[in-house]
Image (cartoon, helix red, strand yellow):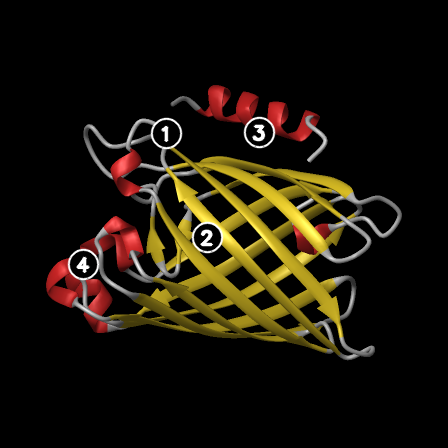
Amino acid sequence: MTALRLLAIALILGATPLPAHAEEDADSPVGWEIGAVSDYLFRGVSQTAGKPTMQGGVSIASERGWYVEGWATGVDFGAGSPSVEVDWSVGYARDFGEALALDVSLNRYSFPGASELDYDEWLASLIVADDYSLTLGYSNDVWNTGSTGLYFAAEAQWALPHAFSLSAGFGRNVFRDSAVTGVRSYVDWNLRVARQFGAAEVALGYYGTDGRARTDFGRTADSRVVLMVKFAR
């Protein structure tokens, strides 16, 4: 799928009454985001063979904490592979005081034209003081392989002068049966600097994985710099 067609999908989604949940406008339950990345990474591994792509999403949240989201991005897994990924999620977020929040969601990763790759994952995040989070992911059919997959992640961000921010993340991907997934458990990490320009965010990050991932995924798991530009409401 060309970048133009992917942009059209993102704009169509953005026109429906469905921001990413984290980008929700305080005065409206509806939001959207659209942008581009120099390389789309999922847990440290390139999903676009090191190429840039466009991305876009929409969501709607209720006052009681329930929300739904839709998000689309280009992908490239090689010849004959799908060219787009569309993710859907239904979740519930709740604050516990001013410094603690919980976000639980069911996520569907889908690949139009290649349903054999579709799978579901539960995600639960504990957010502390808006700037620190711990996340647990669980799938009983990771990558539609029939194997159980777990994901443990920790992230933190810090405000810097002149509207800049610094964030860092660390993740551990665990697979019950590596013989089935074809990939052993591995670690991913990232360090990112971002700046807001009104509705736009520009970020530059450095992403990497451990030796196991680089052996099993090849060059798509090599350390790399990624540029992201996003407009959101």
Type of amino acid under label 1: Pro
Quarter of the figure with the C terminus: top right
Residue 219: x, y in percent? 22, 54
Going from N to C along the chain, the mark reached first, 2 or 3, is: 3
What distance separates the C-alpha of mark 1 from that of mark 3?
A: 15 Å
Q: Nearer the viewer, residue 112 or 106?
A: 106
Q: Amino acid at mark 2?
A: Val
Q: Which residue is mark 1?
A: 112
Question: In the image, what residue type sits under mark 4?
Answer: Thr
Circles 2 and 4 in contact, beta carbons < 8 Å? no
Where does the N terminus fall, quadrant-wise?
Answer: top left
Can you say whether 55 is above or below 1 in the image?
below
Look at discs 2 and 3 and give the one toward the viewer.
Answer: 3
Crowding near the residue tagged with mark 2, few <14, some 14–19, many ≥20 C-alpha atoms within 10 Å: some
Inspect the image, locate mark 3, and give the three-letter code of the amino acid beneath it.
Ala
Label 4: which residue? 181
The part of the image, by quadrant, that contains residue 207 is: bottom left
The residue tagged 3 is: 10
Marks 1 and 2 sit apart, C-alpha to C-alpha, by 26 Å
Task: Report the front residue among 134 and 90.
Answer: 90
> Of label 1 and label 2, which has the lower sequence position?
1
Helix or strand or loop: what does disc 3 sit on?
Answer: helix
Q: Which residue is mark 2?
A: 226
